[in-house]
Amino acid sequence: MKKFVLILVIALFFSPVGAQAEKLVFVTVNFPPLGFVENGQITGSAVEVVREICNRLGFECNIRMLPWKRAMKYMKTGKADAIFGARYTEERAAFLYYPSKSDPLNITKTAIMGLRDSGIKVKAPDDL
């Protein structure tokens, strides 16, 4: 019996199953500088943050850049584990988990600028 337990412990110790990190599939869209393809590699500030988080937590991450509709379909059907860069909407909240609004992952401000003498007048969002 002791010989069997010793063999079992040795087999478990050298088993690759315990050493493998769980693989997670992330999807995102081409949206520089957060995510884009450069020299055939997916990169960008958000991509690097996701990779570092996975690395620190011991997960292997596979990041795929897809068109928006396909990325959403992957999330709805379970082909992907997570998506980043998806703003909150009620429709998306039906199948995506969002952190609480009091604890955002990032804050984005958008500004639209134009040349002073361009003749373009924008006073409301509908003017855009």
Image (tube, rainbow, N blue to C red):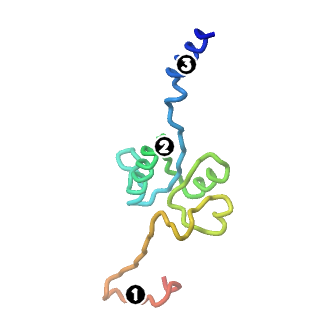
Amino acid type, callout 3: Val
> What residue appears at the point 40 percent right and 77 percent down from the top-left corner?
111
- Gap in angstroms between the C-alphas marked 1 and 2: 45 Å
Q: Residues within 10 Å of mark 1 (few under 14, many from 20)?
A: few
SS at circle 1:
loop
SS at circle 3:
helix
Lower position in the chain sequence, tag 3 or tag 2 = 3
Q: Residue 36: percent from the left, percent from the top?
A: 41, 54
SS at circle 2:
strand
- The front one of 2 and 124 is 2
Q: Residues within 10 Å of mark 2 (few under 14, many from 20)?
A: some
Q: Residue 16: percent from the left, percent from the top?
A: 51, 25
> What residue appears at the point 40 percent right and 48 percent down from the top-left corner?
52
- Marks 3, 2: nearer the viewer: 3
For the residues bearing labels 3 and 1, Cβ distance under 8 angstroms: no
- The front one of 120 and 30 is 30
Q: Is residue 60 above or below residue 123?
A: above
- Label 2 sits on residue: 61
- Label 3 sits on residue: 9
Q: Residue 73: percent from the left, percent from the top?
A: 64, 53
Q: Is residue 3 above or below residue 57?
A: above
- Marks 3, 1: nearer the viewer: 3
- Label 1 sits on residue: 120
Mark linked to residue 38: none
- Gap in angstroms between the C-alphas marked 3 and 1: 74 Å
Amino acid type, callout 2: Cys
